[in-house]
Image: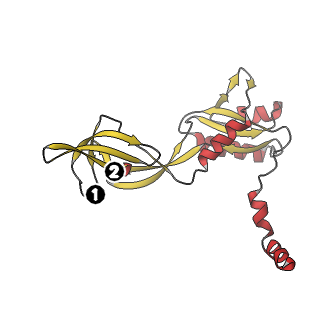
Amino acid sequence: MVSSDAEKLDENPEAEQETEEKPRPEGAQWYVIHSYSGYENKVKKNLEHRIESMGMQDKIFQIVVPTEEEIELKDGQRRVVERRVFPGYILVEMILDDDSWYVVRNTPGVTGFVGSGNNPTPLRQEEVDKILKRMDAEAPKVKISFKVGQKVRIVEGPFEDFTGTVDEIDLDRTRVRVLVNFFGRETPIELDFLQVERV
């Protein structure tokens, strides 16, 4: 028995390594840089190129544009879109000194660090963990374009093309209760978010 357990461990030594987090470089902290909204990915590429060309890999480690996936309904079609969580902001893990500050600050598209004056304020690790966890969420969020009291049209299911009023929204279950006038009286119908659209 002991040998078979040992064999199982040896069969896939990388499996354990994948679950371990990379050790954080000593002195590295996360900072937020500001850029023009809509140019975050271009700024990230510019910064990655500068880090490589200026040999700053030992001081600037990760660049993250916080995004999350959303499901939106457009023209009756469901599609998953990637949405920036903080438009105009990019996270950078780095050891802050004059050289690394200069490289980041003078990257095309970077308008500055978040902080006071020339003193960037590092994020707390809990804040970074929360942002990264949000990005790693397995299920995409459903984008809703309606709120309680608004008129919606049912676009799918047995009540397709009926209109009604949103009575309740359950974000956890991604369900909406719509009051539909059916045979002369209001009837509550529970639907998935993607089965309705705002009128």
Say above or below: 125 vs 139. above
Q: Which residue is pictured at 82% across the width and 41% down the height?
A: 59
Q: Are marks 2 and 1 in contact (CB under 8 Å)?
A: yes
Query: Disc 2 marks which residue?
Result: 191
**Front residue (pair 15, 7):** 7
SS for dot 2:
strand
SS for dot 1:
loop
Residue 29 occupies quadrant: top right
Mark 1: amino acid: Gly
- Would residue 69 be found to the left or right of residue 147 on screen? right
Q: Where does the image place residue 133, in percent across and percent down from the top left?
A: 63, 46
Query: Disc 1 marks which residue?
Result: 157
**Front residue (pair 170, 68):** 170
- Would residue 31 be found to the left or right of residue 148 on screen? right
* Between discs 2 and 1, the one toward the N terminus: 1
Which quadrant would the N terminus be assigned to in this image? bottom right
**Front residue (pair 165, 137):** 165
